[in-house]
Amino acid sequence: LNTGKFHMINNVTGEKVQCTPDGVPLRKFIPGVSGVVRTKERAKLVAKDTSWSSFIHDFSLAPPARPAPFSDEEARSERTATKGRFGVKQKTEPDLFLREMARQRIMYPERVVLAEAAEAAARQKLEEAHKNHAALAASTDPMKMAEAAREKLANKREFKCGSDPTRFTSNMIYRP
């Protein structure tokens, strides 16, 4: 539903303020004070409002004051030392990961034992699967199957028809 009204919402308080499409808040109607105003008075109010908003805007953009420089030696000593660190290569993520893994192996040897046992069990299952696959491949080798089929055909007695032109089948089809 588009009513043609625009609102700004304060995310902190949840307050809703009616405004123009550009985001300028509309003043609330106050009986006896706001309402019908003459053109000259309205121009004065607009000028007053414009000057006030520009005055506030100028102060809101002023940079914050800088803190005083360190004068206390103790505060200077708490700073992080940066001398001699220019151009130093930072540790990469893989290096940090490997260092952390080595630290965990040293601190938690029981985890290492459990991981090695799980890896050994997985390796054994994988080797069994490879053996089963090799046995299945050997039993279904196409070359061996073709050789067995050739032997069957060689042992089979073949029926040969003669070349006599008078040989016909029972339904009168010539059979060479």
Image (cartoon, rainbow, N blue to C red):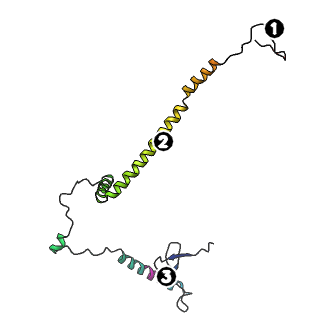
> Any mark on residue 166, and which?
1
> Any mark on residue 43, and which?
3
- Check whether the beta carbons of the residues at disc 2 and disc 1 lie within 8 A of each other: no
> Any mark on residue 129, and which?
2
User: At label 2, which amino acid type do we have?
Assistant: Ala
Label 2 to label 1: alpha-carbon separation: 63 Å
Given the current orientation, which residue lies at the most extreme right position? 171
Give the quarter of the figure containing the N terminus. Answer: bottom right
**Mark 1 element type:** loop
**Foreground residue, 146 or 80?**
146
Residue 25 x, y percent position in the rendering? 50, 78
Question: Is 51 a magenta residue?
Answer: no
**Mark 3 element type:** helix
Q: Tell me if residue 174 comes above or below residue 5 in the rendering.
A: above
Examine the image and state in which quarter residue 175 appears. Answer: top right
**Foreground residue, 18 or 96?**
96
**Mark 2 element type:** helix
Bounds of the magenta span? 44-50
Given the current orientation, which residue lies at the most extreme bottom position? 32
Residue 11 x, y percent position in the rendering? 47, 76
Q: Main secondary structure of the magenta part?
A: helix
Give the quarter of the figure containing the C terminus. Answer: top right
Q: Nearer the viewer, mark 2 or mark 3?
A: 2
Residue 124 x, y percent position in the rendering? 43, 45
Which class describes the residues within 10 Å of circle 3: few (<14), some (14-19), or many (20+)? Answer: few
Q: Tell me if residue 90 comes above or below residue 33 in the rendering.
A: above
